[in-house]
Amino acid sequence: MKYGIMGYSGRMGKLIQEVFNERGHELVYRCDLKEEFRDDVPQVIVDFSTPKAFDRLMVKAEDFNCSLVVGTTALKVDDIDRLKAYAKKKSVVYARNFSKGILIMKNMIKGISGELHDWDIEIIEKHHRFKKDKPSGTAKMLAECFDFEVPTSSIRMGGIPGEHSVLIAGLGEIIEIKHQAISPRTFAEGACSAAERIVKLEKGFYTFDEICAMEEQDG
Ligand code: NAD
């Protein structure tokens, strides 16, 4: 697969290159805040950058007429609408979290959220000191699993790759559902599986849940 990266010099951009290279894919387009290189037309651009790069991403996608795997968090509703409009002609995957564990956690919470109206619930997320958005896109995604408002606390410390806990407390007991990313490589691996899948799909807007479900169906 010929692929491009938006945000190639960032923490995630470097891991994307590592994982895609190991899986035999060829980097033909790379862009960051300062530079842009193009050796060929990518079949897909993988975006782990910043919402500020979104316009540029869409211009490039139109230019190359390529698929998109978008992992940048804190995009605006208008940006997501633009991705959905683009998905009418090319395939797009958008996910605020590309790890399979978070997917399992989200499904667990959806399964029990209807029974939790009498409990105190809070989401606590911890990330490295460089993470710019707060709360994380994943924390927002977990909060959306409830049909009532759930408070979120954010902690930014050291090099924590990413930790999300949902605390569910009654007066005499507490449940904690927790996910820890041991290495951010896991997100790059998820993005790579998504890219490998959608370059084979003509068009459509896909979530990471849908990509993983397709993988399971294939066995
Ligand atoms: P980073 O700050 O290390 O890297 C950002 C990159 O974007 C850099 O290469 C920078 O040069 C580039 N950039 C900045 N402005 C740009 C512009 N105007 N045009 C083009 N490129 C520009 O950040 P990071 O830790 O690599 O995270 C990147 C994004 O990925 C964040 O939004 C983060 O929340 C998200 N993220 C998502 C997941 C997921 O699973 N979806 C996982 C981890 C991180």
Image (cartoon, rainbow, N blue to C red):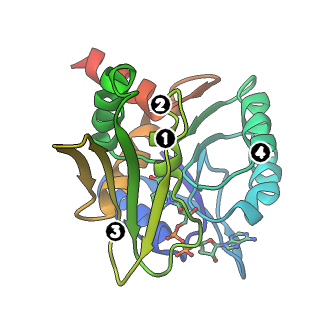
Mark 2 and mark 4 in contact? Answer it, CB < 8 Å.
no
Of all residues, the one furthest to the front in this rendering is 171
Inter-mark Cα distance, 1 to 4? 20 Å
Residue that mark 1 sits on: 143
Q: In this view, does 9 lie above or below 187?
A: below
Describe the element under mark 3 as helix, strand or loop.
Answer: loop
Residue 79: quadrant of the picture: top right
Badge 2: residue crowd in 10 Å (few <14, some 14–19, many ≥20):
some
| 17 lies left or right of 180 | right
The spot of residue 162 in percent (x, y) is 35, 63
Inter-mark Cα distance, 2 to 3? 25 Å
Inter-mark Cα distance, 1 to 3? 20 Å
Residue that mark 3 sits on: 161
Describe the element under mark 1 as helix, strand or loop.
Answer: helix
The spot of residue 46 in percent (x, y) is 56, 52
Instruction: Give the residue at x 56% y 65%.
Output: 134
Q: Is residue 166 above or below residue 32?
A: above
Q: What residue type is labelled 1?
A: Ala
